[in-house]
Each structure stands twice: as C-alpha cells, then as structure tokens.
Amino acid sequence: MADTLYDTDLIIIGGGPGGCAAARMAASVGMRSILIEPDRLCRNLYRIPALNNVLGGYTSGPELADAVVAELKGTELCRLELGRHVTELRADDDRVTITLDTDTRLTAPYAIVATGVGPLQPRDVAWITAPDGLTLPPLWQAEADDAEGRTLLVLGGDRPIGTFLRAHPTTDTRLLVAYPAADAYKIEEIREDPRVTLLPVEHLTLRTGKGIAVSVEAVGRNGERQAITADAVHLSIGNAPTAPSGDLTRGLDGYCPPTDQHPRLIVAGDLRSARFQRIMTAMGSGSEAALHAYYAARELLAKG
C-alpha cells in the first residue's frame, strides 16, 4: 500500500503492547509499518512479575513479552527502529513527519502514538516533600530476594503493590504503604494482606532516600504527626504520560485524548487515559488504531 511519497504506510511510536499489536494488525491487512522504540520491545512487560487479567494463559509479564517479541520480530511488513527516540512529531494535511534523535525524518500517511506512561516521582505530587533532585525506584523494580525480611516504605497506593504481593506470596517482606485520600479506593485489594500496614496520610516529608534507615515524618488525616523508618523506600504513586513533542493535543492531566487529535495522528494504549491502563486494553486499542489507519487510507485512495 505504501506510496512513493511516503517512507511507509504507517509509523508506530512505542513498542509496548499497544504499539506491537498495531504493527501485527497493520501487517495482517497488508500495511507496511516502521515501529520506533527507544528501549527494548515490551520493556515494561518484562518488569511485571505476575499477571491475572490477560487471555492466553500467561501468568507473568516476561512470559507474555517473550511471545509478543517473537511474533513481532517475525512480522515481515514491520521494520523495527530500536534504540531510537522521536524528538518531534508533525502532522500536516497530507502526511505525518517524525524526526528521530539521529535527525532522520520519516513520513507516512498516518502515525500511531503508543508511548505509554512513566512513573511519577515525589516532586510530581503535592502530598510529598522530598530533597531536591531525589529520584526513587518504583516498587516493581524491587527484587524479592533483596527485599526478603526487610521493611519497605511504599509511597502511594497504586496497583503495583498488589502485583508485587501476588508475585511473591511467601515473602516475609513488610510493606508500609503511605497513601493520600485520593488513593483510598486503590488499596482495597491489599487491605487484608498481613504483610501490609496501611498509613493514610495528609502529607509526608521524606528525610533520607538512600541506603538503610529511611526516615519520614507523616502527617495523618487527623493532623497527628508520626515518625516512620524503613529499610528502603519505593514508589507506587502512579504514572505520567510520556508523549513526544510536537502536534499531539494534551489534556490538563497530560494525557492525549484520541478524539482531540489531528486526523492523521491516532493515539493508542495507556497514553489515552489514566482509567484504562491495562495490557488487554492497550492491545485492543493498538489493533483498532491500525485498522483506523487502514480504512482511512483506503477511503483517501478511493477519492483520489
């Protein structure tokens, strides 16, 4: 389907479940694609130790990721550009142009943007005060062997806490989960786990963030102050969109609603909204995005 005016039929930015599904669907209808990913394919899937909400019998992220990567690398109509960053994304009346970190420019009639999200840091939320420049690891980076027998302070009540506990059902790691009122609905799945101590807070001040004896001062919902120590601290405060610069339209929350975009830009996966950050929804939206580009291109050809 590729026209000589373009480098390919479809440019796909992001190599997670959404982007990979888009590439497979595009190939199934005869569309050539170029998939651009700055890291490895399905990099975040490899960091998910346990799965319980995907079809196919996959019980861990690496197991699913290996299957997806193998299929994509065998997709002849998909050209992979791994280790490359998109520095700019532009959409015009007749094409999409992306610029890579090598200053290479690629064009296509349509582009699918499935760059997903990245972890928030303490500086990104109002309820935590932390030393300037401090960057902390998310909970999914915690190694079970290293955490064995230790007490981890977890900032925020986001879903990876439940994933960590399900993946390591016999670990004696103790989790002190400090969370704001906005996260109250998220902690229901971990409330009864004996390894978890829930600490609802109004504000938290982090004194130290490296090594042993992490120390924080927590202000509870009733205004009471409490000193808390732990062996290490990890984050579970949520994610932020990681969209490339250029012509994408962002909402006030930083996400990119599909209905607000240029007709030649199709948003898929977690970048769409904070509400549907699931592997299955990412794959479905990626597949749908590829079909959207396919039918739109056919309509343009028919008019021409």
Image: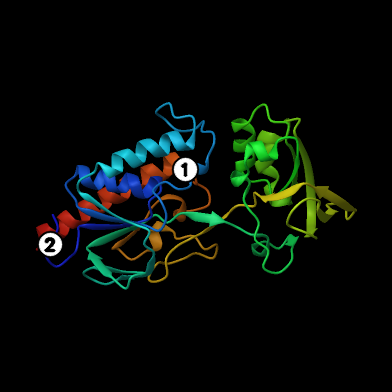
The earlier-in-sequence mark between 1 and 2 is 2
Residue sitting at 69 percent across and 30 percent down? 171
Res. 27 in view: yes
The quarter of the picture where the C terminus appears is bottom left
Q: Are marks 1 and 2 in contact (CB under 8 Å)?
A: no
Density class for disc 1 (Cα within 10 Å; few <14, some 14-19, many ≥20) is many
91 to 232, vertically: above or below:
below
Res. 155 in view: no
Residue sitting at 70 percent across and 45 percent down? 184
Secondary structure state at the residue bearing disc 1: helix
Secondary structure state at the residue bearing disc 2: loop
Which one is nearer the viewer's eye here, 107 or 66? 66
Tell me the CA gap for discs 1 and 2: 34 Å
Residue 8: percent from left, percent from top: 20, 59
Residue 113: percent from left, percent from top: 37, 58
Residue 142 falls left or right of residue 287: right
Instruction: Identify the residue under disc 2.
Output: 3
Which one is nearer the viewer's eye here, 245 or 72? 72
Residue sitting at 79 percent across and 45 percent down? 199
Q: Which mark is residue 45?
A: 1
Residue sitting at 62 percent across and 41 percent down? 143
The quarter of the picture where the N terminus appears is bottom left
Residue 250: percent from left, percent from top: 47, 65
Quadrant of res 188: top right
Amino acid type of the residue that numbered disc 2 sits on in the rendered structure: Asp
